[in-house]
Image (cartoon, rainbow, N blue to C red):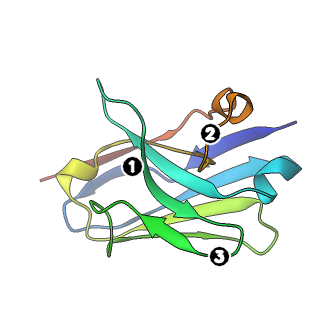
Amino acid sequence: QVQLVESGGGLVQAGGSLRLSCAASGAVFRLTDMGWYRQVPGNQRELVATLTTSGATIYADSVKGRFTISRDNAKTTIYLQMNNLKPQDTGVYYCNAATLTNWSASRWGPGTQVTVSS
């Protein structure tokens, strides 16, 4: 079954850290660039971190230097290490293909809530 399941969110004070995990089942997710998205109420999902199949990483300016995206060797789990969290990092975090297609856009997981208090 092809699915994405995110976990690891929670409530943390500003300056704290969290590590998000995304269990990605399905061969297609092992063969494509993957990303972490953030959504706040009223806004569209924003791509904040990308990990290419060659291992390159790309970050939004808002998280550069604080977030790190990685994946395990089996390429079934994608991680997002978030350090020095800020209240503006609050949102629901999702993983999915970094370049969305009709197929991947229909495969969003439940997401995981991250709340950063000031």
Residue located 36% across and 59% down the image? 60
Q: Is residue 12 left or right of residue 75?
A: left
Res 42 quadrant in image:
top left
Residues at marks 2 and 1, CA–CA distance in whole angstroms: 26 Å
| Residue labelled with disc 1 | 10
For this rendering, which residue is in front, 35 or 54?
54
Disc number for residue 118: none
The kind of secondary structure element at disc 2 is loop
Residue located 28% across and 56% down the image? 12
Residue located 66% across and 58% down the image? 33
> Which badge, 2 or 1, is on the more N-terminal residue?
1
| Residue labelled with disc 2 | 100
Q: Nearer the viewer, mark 1 or mark 3?
A: 3
Dot 3 alpha-carbon crowd within 10 angstroms: few under 14, some 14 to 19, many 20 or more: few
* Amino acid at the residue labelled 2: Leu
Dot 2 alpha-carbon crowd within 10 angstroms: few under 14, some 14 to 19, many 20 or more: few
| Callouts 1 and 3 close, C-beta under 8 Å | no
Check the image and report above or below for 76 versus 115: below
> Which badge, 3 or 2, is on the more N-terminal residue?
3
Residue located 27% across and 59% down the image? 62
* Amino acid at the residue labelled 1: Gly
Disc number for residue 55: 3
Residues at marks 1 and 3, CA–CA distance in whole angstroms: 28 Å
| Residue 67 x, y percent position in the rendering | 39, 68
For this rendering, which residue is in front, 1 or 11?
1
The kind of secondary structure element at disc 3 is loop
* Amino acid at the residue labelled 3: Gly
Check the image and report above or below for 94 versus 16: above
Residues at marks 3 and 2, CA–CA distance in whole angstroms: 19 Å
The kind of secondary structure element at disc 1 is strand
> Which badge, 1 or 3, is on the more N-terminal residue?
1
| Residue 104 x, y percent position in the rendering | 70, 35
